């Protein structure tokens, strides 16, 4: 399967044990119809059945996430993908690090390895397709109106649709513990950080600058899911597409320093965000990346509008 636009064959760094991708996330929310409105407007092919909503990318049909209705808003689990030859090694590796391997949760039969992370969030490592890139996919700006008029007419643009999941950013009470756990147990590597406030991690077999990132908070929680789109126009048009459907709260257009991506964040119905992201840096498998500790002002953004006051609020924390 080709996922997200042109980054096969799967790259791997020989000799290192590490997950290579995020395969899927499962999110619990009170009312799945809120999710259907939000993610449908965001540009997913949404498929509802049995009080669940599946989120597929339209171009390749890949299922990136499922949303389950009827619970409080929280991440139910995240499934990471590994290479087939690494699954048995991971089982030994988890046991060697004192990580208890669990039975699959009810309703999620799988032959993967299930365990809790440092904050008690359920994770799975299973064999699966490499969804993370080893090089940038081409930018795909809308076709110009004429060779001179490089902006298209409004009627000529297509709606923004994510190409693939880029990364998940979690709140955690202890960023150092998060980095230690995801390095030691899952084999991710530090990309960059800013003291104990935020840390970004990539996959050693080639991935975006961050596959997972962790921001400090009083409690665990989801800050945002980030979705790769093909152009800066797609970021801006996506923001407008969401505002047209009533989802106008968020932050953007801007550009990050760490990861270099252009962004627009749209606030979801539960107070976390979905990010339209474009042109993020890739850390290829062959690179020995040295993560650095950056000044706080570089950990956030290069340019953009003022940050909304509640952008960093963890709505999953008690009293938020
Ligand atoms: Fe992001």
Image: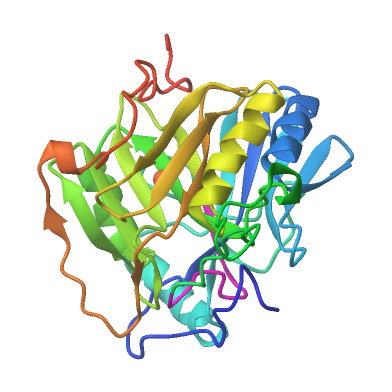
Apparent side of residue 157 relative to residue 100 in the rendered image (left or right): right
Which residue is at the far right? 49
For residue 115, say whether it is visible: no
Query: Which quarter of the frame holds ligand 1?
Result: top left
Q: Residue at x 62, y 74 (%)?
A: 128
Residue 99 highlighted magenta (yes or no):
no
Quadrant (top left/top right/bottom left/bottom right) for the N terminus: bottom right
- What segment is highlighted magenta in the picture? 122-135
Q: Residue at x 21, y 42 (%)?
A: 299
Residue 133 highlighted magenta (yes or no):
yes
For residue 177, say whether it is visible: yes
Quadrant (top left/top right/bottom left/bottom right) for the C terminus: top left
> Compared with residue 215, is residue 89 higher up or lower down, i.e. above or below?
below
Q: Give percent across and percent down for residue 184.
A: 29, 64
Q: Give percent across and percent down for residue 316.
A: 48, 23
Q: Residue at x 77, y 63 (%)?
A: 61
Which residue is at the far bottom? 14
Which residue is at the far front? 148
Q: Give percent across and percent down for residue 71.
A: 69, 25
Apparent side of residue 18 relative to residue 104 in the rendered image (left or right): left
> Compared with residue 311, is residue 253 higher up or lower down, i.e. above or below?
below
Q: Residue at x 79, y 41 (%)?
A: 53
> Compared with residue 79, is residue 262 higher up or lower down, i.e. above or below?
above
Q: Quadrant of residue 127?
A: bottom right
Q: Give percent across and percent down for residue 239.
A: 57, 35
């Amino acid at each position: 399967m080709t996922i997200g636009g042109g980054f096969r064959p799967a790259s791997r760094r020989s000799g290192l044990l590490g997950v290579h991708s995020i395969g899927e996330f499962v999110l619990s929310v009170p009312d799945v119809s809120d999710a259907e409105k939000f993610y449908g407007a965001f540009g997913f092919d949404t498929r509802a059945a049995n009080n669940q909503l599946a989120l597929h990318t339209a171009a390749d049909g890949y299922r990136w996430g499922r949303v389950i209705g009827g619970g409080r808003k929280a991440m139910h689990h995240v499934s990471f993908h590994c290479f087939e030859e690494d699954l048995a090694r991971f089982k030994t590796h988890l046991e060697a690090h004192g990580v208890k391997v669990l039975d699959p949760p009810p309703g999620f039969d799988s032959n993967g390895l299930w365990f809790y992370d440092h904050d008690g969030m359920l994770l799975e490592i299973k064999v699966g397709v490499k969804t993370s890139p080893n090089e940038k996919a081409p930018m795909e700006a809308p076709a110009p109106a004429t060779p001179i008029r490089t902006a298209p007419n409004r009627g000529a643009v297509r709606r923004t649709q994510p190409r693939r999941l880029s990364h998940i950013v979690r709140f955690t009470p202890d960023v150092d513990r998060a980095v230690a756990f995801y390095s030691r147990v899952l084999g991710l590597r530090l990309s960059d950080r800013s003291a104990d406030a935020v840390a970004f991690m990539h996959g050693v077999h080639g991935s975006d600058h961050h596959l997972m990132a962790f921001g400090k908070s009083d409690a665990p929680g989801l800050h945002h899911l980030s979705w790769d789109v093909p152009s800066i126009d797609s970021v801006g048009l996506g923001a407008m597409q969401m505002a047209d459907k009533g989802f106008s709260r968020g932050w953007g257009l801007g550009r990050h320093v760490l990861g270099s991506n252009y962004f627009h964040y749209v606030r979801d119905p539960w107070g976390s965000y979905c990010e339209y992201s474009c042109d993020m840096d890739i850390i290829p498998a062959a690179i020995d990346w040295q993560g650095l500790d950056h000044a706080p002002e570089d950990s956030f953004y290069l340019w953009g509008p003022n940050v909304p006051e509640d952008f960093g609020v963890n709505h999953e924390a008690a009293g938020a």
